[in-house]
Amino acid sequence: MKNRNSLLIDTDIHPAVSSERVQARLPQPWRTRYASGNRGPGNLGWWNPNGVDRSDVKLESGESIHANPALLIRHFFDEYDIDYGIFIPGGVLHMAQSPEPDFAAAAISAVNDVIAEEWLPLNSRFRSSLAVYPHLPEMAVAEIHRLGDHPQIVQVQLPSGSRIPWGQRLFHPIFEAACEYGLAIAIHPGSEGVGLSGPPNAAGYPTSYFEWHTTLVNSYIAHLTSMLAEGVFAKFPKLKFVLVEGGISWLPPILWRMDKNWKALRTTIPWLNELPSEIAARHIRLSTQPLEEPANADHFHAMLEMFPAERMLMFSSDFPHWDGDAPDFAMRQFPERLRPRIMGETAAELYGLV
C-alpha cells in the first residue's frame, strides 16, 4: 500500500485485553469484584446501531483480531505494512472515571501489566499508552513511576471526559512525572458523561448516541484551551499533548480565537508570553481519525492549510472500531506533500521511533 521509503505509524489501536488475565493479576477483594462484572462506571446507554467494533474484526474461528497479538500482526499490521502501532487500551477509560479510586487504580494497573508482560514483548512494532487513574494524581504518578521506563511505553493516557480541565494545577504532578520518563500525554474520548466526568457536554445530557458522538469535540476544545491558558507548556517545556480521536477541523478557529483574546487579555494569564497558536504548534499533536469528509475535498484541504498540519497531525486508524479509517483510505484524503509527515514521520519524532 505504501511507498517503502516512508514510515507508516498508527497512533490509535485498541487491543482487547483478556478479562481473565486482568483478573488473575488483581489482589483480593478486587479480584472477586472484577470477576463479578461490576467494574465501575459504564455508559449512559445510548444505542449505536453499528456496535463498537467493525463487523469483520471477528474471524470465522470466532477469534477477534484485536484480542490476539499474533492475529493483530497478521491481519492488520502485515496487511497494511504498518511499521509501528500505538496501543490505547479502551476499557480503562471508563474505569478512570470511577468514584472508587482503590479498585479503579488496581484494575487499571492490572490492564497495564497484561499489555506490558503479554503483548509488548511479542513484537518490536508494538508500542503502548500507560493508563492511569487521574482524579487522585498521586495514584497516577505512582503508576508512571512503576512502568514509565518500559522501553515500549510512549505516553500516559487520560480520558477526555473530566470533572475539570486537564491543564489545571491539580494535575501538574502527572505531567511532571511523564516528563521525567520522556512520555507524552494523550487524551481519548468515550467516557464523557460517565462517573466523575460530569455532563457529556457544556449544555448537559443529549438524548442520542448521534448527538453525544458529535459533541465530543467540546471536551477537546476545553482541554486544549486549559493546557495553553494554564501555562502548562511554560512549566513543562518538553511536554507534548496528543488529542486522539477528536477531529481536526475545529482546531484553526479555536487557535484564532485564542490568539485574538490573548492580545487583549494576556494580563489575566501572564505566564503565557507568546501567541497560543505558536505554543500549540510545538506542543500539540492530533490524530487523524475521525476525518471530516466534506462533499468538496478542497474544503478539507483548505482547513489543513490553516494550521501546520505537517507538524501537528498524525495518522490513526482507531482499529477495530466501527468508524475507523484504514491507512490507504486516510492517506488518500491528504495532499501528497503532507502524506509522509502525517502517515509516519511526525509520530516517529514524537515517540522516538527514528
Image: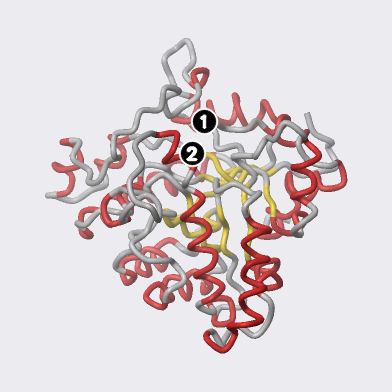
38 relative position to 129: left or right: left
Q: Which of marks 2 and 1 is nearer the N terminus?
A: 2
- How far across and how far down the image is residue 274, in percent? 68, 81
Q: Quadrant of residue 137?
A: bottom left
**Quick one: label 2, few (<14), some, or many (20+) residues within 10 Å?**
many
Checking the image for residue 50, the label placed there is none
Looking at the picture, tell me which residue is in the foreground, 167 or 113. Answer: 167
- How far across and how far down the image is residue 238, in percent? 61, 74
SS for callout 1: loop
Looking at the picture, tell me which residue is in the foreground, 87 or 247. Answer: 247
Residue position for label 2: 14
Q: Alpha carbon of mark 2 to alpha carbon of mark 1: how far?
A: 7 Å
Q: In which quarter of the image is residue 254?
A: bottom right
Q: Which residue is drawn at 86% across and 41% down?
A: 336
Most extreme residue toward the top is 60
**Quick one: label 1, few (<14), some, or many (20+) residues within 10 Å?**
many
301 relative position to 166: left or right: right
Q: Taking 235 as reference, is 88 above or below it?
A: above
**At label 1, which amino acid type do we have?**
Pro
Q: How many marks?
A: 2
Q: Residue at x 55, y 33 (%)?
A: 319
SS for callout 2: loop
23 relative position to 282: left or right: left
Image quadrant in which the N terminus is located: top right
Q: Taking 148 as reference, is 27 above or below it?
A: above
- How far across and how far down the image is residue 301, in percent? 79, 44
Mark 2–mark 1 CB contact (< 8 Å): yes
- How far across and how far down the image is residue 166, in percent? 44, 67
Residue position for label 1: 320
**At label 2, which amino acid type do we have?**
His
